[in-house]
Image (tube, rainbow, N blue to C red):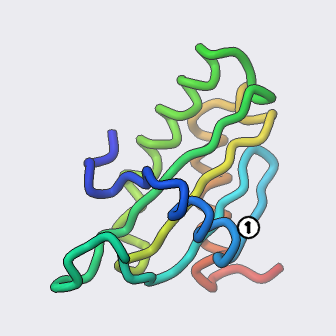
Amino acid sequence: MLPSENRLRRREDFATAVRRGRRAGRPALVVHLRSGVTDPHGSGEESPPTRAGFVVSKAVGGAVVRTAVKRKLRHLMRERLSRLPEGSLVVVRALPPAGDADQAQLARDLDAALERLLGGGAR
């Protein structure tokens, strides 16, 4: 589970990450990353933590499948937060193949997308 301070909750934050961030797509998911933004809702005294949010639509599957996908993605993202710049906003959008993917496949797709967004991979 992601710690509370690392969760993306506000609609405006999701929109900022999706509209103004960079995007990398993989077969099971799309990752949107907005690097190092300042938190307009924070106190401004310290750098805001990296926050992540997840979008899993009904196209992925029923409620049980969507919940399982969200849990897997939250667990995988928790392990990767330290690789991201401080104050980043990350939105992970699951695509329909994510409903049938196992945790290892989701991990490979997430790692490949983050690697590309952080400048390590070519198009």
Q: Quadrant of residue 51?
A: bottom left
- Eyeballing the image, is 37 above or below 15? below
State the residue in front, 84 or 14: 14
Q: Report whether residue 100 is seen.
A: no
Position of residue 36 in the picture relative to residue 104 (left or right): left
**Residue 35: % across, % down:** 51, 81
* Residue position for label 1: 24
- Element at label 1: strand
Q: Which amino acid does label 1 sit on?
A: Ala
Q: Residue 41 at x, y = what percent?
A: 32, 70
How packed mark 1 is, by other alpha carbons closer than 10 Å (few <14, some 14-19, many 20 or more), is some
Which quadrant holds residue 81? bottom left
Q: What residue appears at the point 67 percent right and 49 percent down from the top-left corner?
A: 93
Residue 33, given in percent of the width and then of the height, sits at 59, 71
Quarter of the image with the C terminus in it: bottom right
From the top left corner, tell me how far across and down residue 78 is, in percent: 37, 51
Q: Nearer the viewer, residue 67 or 76?
A: 67
Judge from the rendering whether residue 97 lies leftward or rightward of residue 73; answer left or right: right
**Residue 97 seen in the current view:** yes
Tell which of 112 and 63 is nearer to you.
Answer: 63
The residue that appears at 46% across and 46% down in the rendered structure is: 76
Residue 104, quarter of the rendered image: top right
Question: Which quadrant: the N terminus?
Answer: top left
Q: In this view, does 77 lie above or below 12?
A: above
